[in-house]
Image: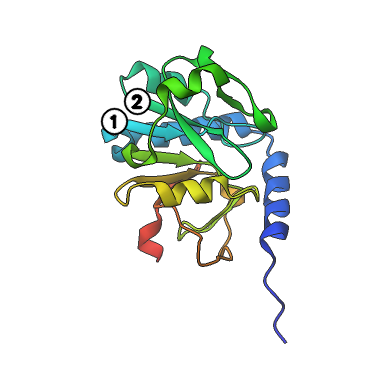
Amino acid sequence: MPSASPSKSTLRQQHLAARNALKDRPERSKRIAIRLSDWDAFRQAETILCYVAARSEVDTRPILPELLSTGKRLVVAYCIDDEQLGLFHLTDLSELASGRFGILEPKAELRDSRRIAPAVIDLAILPGAVLDLRGNRIGYGKGYFDRLLAELAPETERCALAFECQLVDDVPTEPHDLPVDTLITENRLIDCRAFR
């Protein structure tokens, strides 16, 4: 009898532990940032949603000033409630403060003045805990980015940043799960559509 596939929770725990154990995370993050900056879709996008890194995620904090200085519209997410993310047009890093889960978010008093609709995003750069080459991803279990993916325009390029240790052969999916189009690691840029 074949063994059962690991659950999302088990995969998440295993691969977050592997990510946390990486000794050279800053160097790997820099390599990912260079691949991202050199990518045509990144250079051509005008409105870019980019997660603000927390814990042991691929560090996006060095990318944010670059985005702000190039004239692109930088959008960051924040928690509205237990179900939903809001999107904010960030114009300066000083507009961020520690929010829910200890993640940097736009300051609460600024949020209403510069809300952004998901449909105007050209490129969405997302985190993930576990990913496969088809672009299927496991997040952190709350479903925030899964719900956001469903709100993006069909033509929005969806990209995830991850370390190679976070990749698996097959991420278990459910009918509501939406994959990313591109995956960028420290070693490669992967067009996930080629594996579907």
Answer with the quarter of the image where residue 194 lies: bottom left
Drawn side of residue 177 relative to residue 1, left or right:
left
Q: Point out residue 96 in the picture as x, y percentages from the top left corner.
A: 55, 19
Q: Residue at the location (53% across, 38% down)?
A: 85
Q: Point out residue 45 in the picture as x, y percentages from the top left corner.
A: 29, 34
Give SS at disc 1: loop
Q: Quadrant for the N terminus, please.
A: bottom right
**Marks 2 and 1 in Cβ contact (< 8 Å):** yes
Tell how many labels: 2
Foreground: 156 or 164? 156
- Which label sits on residue 46? 1
- Which label sits on residue 73? 2
Q: Residue at the location (49% across, 23% down)?
A: 111
Q: Dot 2: within a 10 Å radius of its alpha carbon, few (fewer than 14), some, or many (20 or more) residues?
A: some
Q: Point out residue 168 in the picture as x, y percentages from the top left corner.
A: 58, 59
What's the residue type where badge 1 is placed?
A: Glu
Q: Residue at the location (33% across, 35% down)?
A: 42
Answer with the quarter of the image where residue 120 lies: top left
What's the residue type where badge 2 is placed?
A: Arg
Asked whether residue 98 appears in the rendered view, the answer is yes
Drawn side of residue 72 relative to residue 139, left or right:
left
Asked whether residue 107 appears in the rendered view, the answer is no
